[in-house]
Structure formats: structure tokens, C-alpha cells
Amino acid sequence: MLAEFVQRIPAGSKVRVERTTGGTLRGTLMKASPDTLVVQKNTRVPEPPVEVPLAQVTRVTLDTGGSSVGKTVAISVGAGVGATFGVLLLLAAIFSGS
């Protein structure tokens, strides 16, 4: 069942692979076959792709990066409020100087 799921994930997707050894691998899915996964690790220094046998994989999930709609809305509201207070302070400084 895991092999079918992994083969449906498009190549180039960011994935998180949890292994039976307890380690986690994050990277870009390069290729998925019925027996193995090929993942390019997310590192600053380029490394060769890692081939992981499906027998050593417990779970594969899409790595979304932690961004959500709520987080985006909160950041936007915070920026809008900050800009509004900045303009009000600027106006107060201009009119109090006269």
C-alpha cells in the first residue's frame, strides 16, 4: 500500500521520509518505484541523491514547510496595523510641529 501511495506523489515534491531505524529524511522526491525511493536531501552543501528501500520506510508525508492560511492572515493583519500606526504617528508629528 505504501508503494502505491509513493508512486502517486509527483516527482519534485517536498517529502519527509520516516525510516524504521528511527531517522527522518527531508528532501525532494526524485523517483519512486515499487521497491525504492530516491530523495535529494535538503542541505546547504550538495549531496548525491539517497536511495531508500521501501522496506526501511515507515511513513512518507508531503512536507508543506509549516505555512498555513491562518499564519499568513496574521502576518498580513500585523503588517497593516503597523503601517496604520506609523502613518498616524507621522501625521501627529507633522501637525504638532505647527
Image (spheres, rainbow, N blue to C red):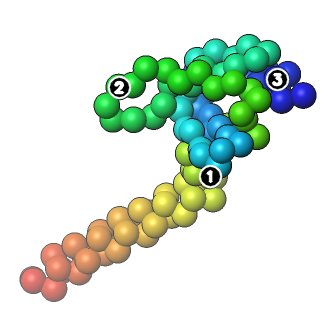
Q: Quadrant of residue 13?
A: top right
Residue 60: x and y in percent read 72, 36
User: Residue placed farthest to the left in the image?
Assistant: 98
Q: Does residue 8 lie above or below 85 as drawn?
A: above
**Do the numbered discs 3 and 1 sit on residues whose CB atoms are within 8 Å?**
no
Q: In whole angstroms, how far apart are the C-alphas of marks 1 and 2?
A: 29 Å
Residue lying at 69% horizontally and 24% vertically, measured from the top left? 53
Mark carried by residue 68? 1
User: Residue placed farthest to the front in the image?
Assistant: 21
Q: In whole angstroms, how far apart are the C-alphas of marks 3 and 1?
A: 28 Å
Amino acid carrying label 1: it is: Ser
Side of 93 relative to 38 (left or right): left
Q: Which residue is mark 2?
A: 46
Residue 83 vs residue 92, the one in the foreground: 83
Mark carried by residue 9? none
Residue lying at 83% horizontally and 29% vertically, measured from the top left? 2
Residue 15: x and y in percent read 62, 34
Judge depth for marks 3 and 1 and give the one in front. 3
Decide if residue 59 is in sight here.
no
Mark 1 and mark 2 lie on one chain; the one further toward the N terminus is 2
Residue 5 vs residue 59, the one in the foreground: 59
Side of 7 relative to 18 (left or right): right
Q: Quadrant of residue 64?
A: top right
Residue 40: x and y in percent read 50, 25
**Do the numbered discs 1 and 2 sit on residues whose CB atoms are within 8 Å?**
no
**Do the numbered discs 2 and 3 sit on residues whose CB atoms are within 8 Å?**
no
Mark 3 and mark 1 lie on one chain; the one further toward the N terminus is 3
Mark carried by residue 3? 3
Amino acid carrying label 3: it is: Ala
Amino acid carrying label 2: it is: Pro
Residue 32: x and y in percent read 70, 17
SS at mark 3 in the image: helix
